[in-house]
Image: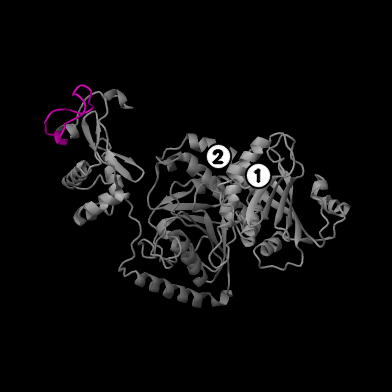
């Protein structure tokens, strides 16, 4: 099925790429799933697979008998080998594969189900066959993904009770996602691994995450004292804690003493401490939520001096969870602390060693991807054997970088430390920075509220008059001139350099300033227009007393569109 009007044209290479992503990411096309785990892969030496007579088999250990019963000559392979073949980098001595996978559900009371996937490279055909899903399950659907005359086709391969639901899923979810994946390859033909949770077992992760979510999630959300969104931060840190615990178990390296540098709300430290892992968090500024944690949660308020390499010799794991200015320093501090210290880094905002905003090295990459590459370069300079993995958290910046082993002998440690120190000093000099300056204890308020009032009033008046300027497209609402809609880019071009300079350092800049004046302006996307004066009954909050003068009454050529009784603001020329 390729909908008319939809551009389904793809190459065979792109079809392979889409399939390679699908077999590892069923949760991306079914929001009820939390992940997928490959159980077994079979390379088919001959073509003898009858899809229509392919039997359902619950016991995967007996699956080779299923293939034998179909008269299939096969050999055992692996997911990584199949992935290499799909990328065009592996041996293609076999052109057909059977992959058996296990699907896990977000609802942990729901049992996992298994699917078989048959990949035919000769005919560019893929079949997904549920093995043990219940009859009423949304995983019961059989479907195929094929390349026909250069077009992607996704079809239902077996009648089902909810065919309309299945067709809608294919049309609006699966096919668009496959086309997106197919066209996601790099220009040089290389593709990066897209697998999430590649360093831990997905089944263990699903079970542990469900347990920790049940144990900590609701209670912490209910008791949240910060102004940030608890649903995002609580469940994100539950997921990170889950990952770290499983990573430590896999490495057989449970920390004797970890440190979370720039721990922020301290939630990750709280969960790890509560689960019996020894360590502490450090941040330059205490958060209100620290007070709700028990004494067993170890959090310290003090400034981290990154080039004081003797300060953390007592720790064996260093964690950087959205550690901002400290992110490029995490591999360095780890390397210089001791030969056996390891690190886990989840970068977010990009910074230089000097504390300045990161300057891209590669114009073809986004700032985030370029910074990830830079951090891995730093890790390599520190002589770590570096791994990266994609976490399952509610964030677009979810790639973790892990340094869990060194690429040199312990006898070389002092020489390597000298090389690292020289490298860091060289990097700081590149930014033309004198003293190393990271974050201040008191965060500067940068929402345009601290700018001189006369400057703000002047900018607001200039924007107001510009919107009212008659260019033949002005609108009227009940004889009241409402002006035109203009883009933020147009306003930025209109304002003077001095005006823009005054708001450049503020978060959001011009848009934030305009939004702060919501009684005058209305922002829709990147468009700005005058807001029609609001009546008192339209306000969501009850206005007990009128305190502020009406801007339109004072400055609009038609005055205010409302009477003094209707208007939320004072219709008098008064001094405030």
- Quick check: 185 above or below 284? below
Q: Nearer the viewer, mark 2 or mark 1?
A: 1
The segment highlighted magenta reads 554-576
Q: Secondary structure at mark 1?
A: helix
Sequence order check, earlier mark of 2 and 1: 1
Q: Position of residue 377 (x, y in %)?
A: 49, 69
Q: Residue 367 sits in which quadrant?
A: bottom left
Residue closer to the observer: 14 or 348: 14
- Quick check: 187 above or below 559? below
Q: Residues within 10 Å of mark 2 (few under 14, many from 20)?
A: some
Residue closer to the observer: 347 or 218: 347
Q: Position of residue 512 (x, y in %)?
A: 30, 45
Residue closer to the observer: 119 or 541: 119
What is the distance, in whole Å, between disc 2 and disc 1 at their CAs?
A: 14 Å
**Residue placed at 65% from the left, 44% from the top?**
207
Would you name the residue on which mark 1 appears?
207
**Residue placed at 81% from the left, 54% from the top?**
49
Q: Position of residue 130 (x, y in %)?
A: 74, 44
Task: Decide whether residue 567 is among the magenta residues.
Answer: yes
**Left or right of 34 in this view: 231:** left
Q: Residue 531 sits in which quadrant?
A: top left
Q: Which mark is residue 512?
A: none
Main secondary structure along the magenta-highlighted residues: loop
Question: In the picture, which quadrant includes the C terminus?
Answer: top left
Task: Decide whether residue 513 is among the magenta residues.
Answer: no
Q: Position of residue 517 (x, y in %)?
A: 26, 39
Would you name the residue on which mark 2 appears?
216
**Residue placed at 53% from the left, 56% from the top?**
399
């Amino acid at each position: 099925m390729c909908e008319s009007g939809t551009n389904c044209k793809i190459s065979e290479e792109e079809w392979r790429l889409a399939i390679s992503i699908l077999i590892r990411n069923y949760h991306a096309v079914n929001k009820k799933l939390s992940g997928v785990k490959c159980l077994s892969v079979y390379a088919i030496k001959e073509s003898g697979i009858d899809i229509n007579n392919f039997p359902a088999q619950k016991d995967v250990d007996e699956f080779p008998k299923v293939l034998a019963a179909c008269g299939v000559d096969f050999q055992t392979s692996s997911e990584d080998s199949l992935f290499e073949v799909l990328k065009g980098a592996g041996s293609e001595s076999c052109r057909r594969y059977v992959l058996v996978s296990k699907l896990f559900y977000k609802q942990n009371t729901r049992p996992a189900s298994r699917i078989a996937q048959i990949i035919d490279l000769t005919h560019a055909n893929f079949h997904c066959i549920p093995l043990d899903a219940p009859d009423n399950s949304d995983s019961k659907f059989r479907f195929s993904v094929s390349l026909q005359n250069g077009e992607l086709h996704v079809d239902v391969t077996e009648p089902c009770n909810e065919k309309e639901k299945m067709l809608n899923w294919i049309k609006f979810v699966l096919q668009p996602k496959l086309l997106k994946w197919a066209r996601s390859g790099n220009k040089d033909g290389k593709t990066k691994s897209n697998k999430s949770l590649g360093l831990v077992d997905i089944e263990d992760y699903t079970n542990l995450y469900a347990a920790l979510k049940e144990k900590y999630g609701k209670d912490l959300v209910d008791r949240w004292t910060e102004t940030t969104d608890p649903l995002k931060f609580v469940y994100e840190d539950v997921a990170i804690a889950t990952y770290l615990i499983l990573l430590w178990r896999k490495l057989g390296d449970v920390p004797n003493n970890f440190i979370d540098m720039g721990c922020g709300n301290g939630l990750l430290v709280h969960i790890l401490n509560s689960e019996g892992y020894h360590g502490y968090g450090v941040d330059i500024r205490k958060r209100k939520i620290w007070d709700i944690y028990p004494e067993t949660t170890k959090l310290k308020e003090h400034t981290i001096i990154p080039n004081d390499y003797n300060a953390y010799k007592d720790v064996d794991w260093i964690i950087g969870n959205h550690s901002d200015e400290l992110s490029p320093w995490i591999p360095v501090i780890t390397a210089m602390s001791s030969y056996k210290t390891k690190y886990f880094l989840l970068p977010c905002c990009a910074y230089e060693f000097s504390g300045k905003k990161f300057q891209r090295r590669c114009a073809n990459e986004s700032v985030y991807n370029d910074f990830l590459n830079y951090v891995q370069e730093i890790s390599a300079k520190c002589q770590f054997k570096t791994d990266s993995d994609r976490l399952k958290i509610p964030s677009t910046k979810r790639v973790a970088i892990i340094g869990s082993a060194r690429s040199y002998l312990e006898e070389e440690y002092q020489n390597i430390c000298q090389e690292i120190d020289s490298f860091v000093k060289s990097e700081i000099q590149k930014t033309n920075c004198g003293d190393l300056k990271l974050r201040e204890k008191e965060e500067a308020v940068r929402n345009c509220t601290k700018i001189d009032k006369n400057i703000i009033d002047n900018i607001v008046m200039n924007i107001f008059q510009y919107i009212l300027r008659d260019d033949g497209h002005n609108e009227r609402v009940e004889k009241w001139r409402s002006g035109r809609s203009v883009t933020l880019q147009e306003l930025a071009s209109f304002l003077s350099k001095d005006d823009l300079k005054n708001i450049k350092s503020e978060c959001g800049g011009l848009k934030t300033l305009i939004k702060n004046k919501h009684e005058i302006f209305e922002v829709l996307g990147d468009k700005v227009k005058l807001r029609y004066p609001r009546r008192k009954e339209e306000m969501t909050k009850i206005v007990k007393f009128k305190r502020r003068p009406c801007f339109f009454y004072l400055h609009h050529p038609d005055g205010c569109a409302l009477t003094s009784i209707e208007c939320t603001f004072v219709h008098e020329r008064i001094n405030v």
